[in-house]
């Protein structure tokens, strides 16, 4: 039996976000439009409306899921 490859949920940012300079929200991700975030936890795990994720460079933090859309990758051979 072959198992499907399990892939984490990924989203793509639709707006940019920069943390306030006063130090508030220091545990939030900073991102630019079009960046991909791998979702590590949703509302049920974070106990808030924010999600927790990681950027490709390794930075982790909270982000607003309303600032994202599903990320769809096109894999080679997907249409064969």
Image (cartoon, grey):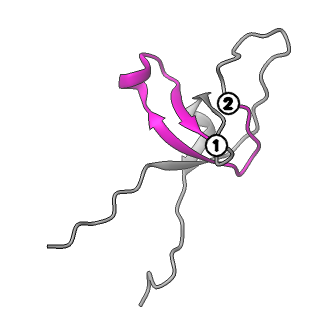
Q: Which residue is mark 1?
A: 55
Crowdedness of circle 1 by 10 Å Cα count: few (<14), some, many (20+)? some
17 relative position to 46: left or right: right
What span is colored magenta in the figure? 30-54
Q: Position of residue 40 (x, y in %)?
A: 46, 36
For image coordinates 73% across by 32% down, the residue present is 30
Determine whether the residue tagged by mark 1 lies in a helix, strand or loop: loop
- The residue lying furthest to the right in this view is 21
Q: Is residue 47 shown left or right of residue 71?
A: left
Residue linked to disc 2: 29
Q: For residue 35: magenta?
A: yes
Q: Is tag 2's residue or tag 1's residue first in the polypeptide sequence? A: 2
- The image shows residue 79, relative to residue 15, as above or below, that is below
x then y, percent, for residue 69:
56, 48
Per the model, the C-alpha gap separating discs 2 and 1 is: 8 Å
Find residue 17 and report its image quarter: top right
Tell me the residue at 58%/39% (across/down): 54
| Residue that sits furthest to the left in the current view | 1
> In this image, 44 relative to 73: left or right?
left
Image quadrant where one finds the N terminus: bottom left
């Amino acid at each position: 039996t072959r198992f499907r490859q399990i892939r984490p949920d990924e989203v793509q940012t639709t707006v940019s976000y920069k943390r306030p300079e006063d130090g508030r929200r220091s545990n939030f991700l900073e991102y630019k439009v079009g960046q991909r975030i791998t979702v590590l936890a949703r509302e049920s795990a974070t106990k808030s409306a924010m999600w927790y994720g990681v950027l490709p460079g390794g930075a982790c933090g909270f982000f607003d899921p309303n600032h994202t859309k599903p990320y769809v990758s096109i894999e080679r051979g997907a249409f064969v």
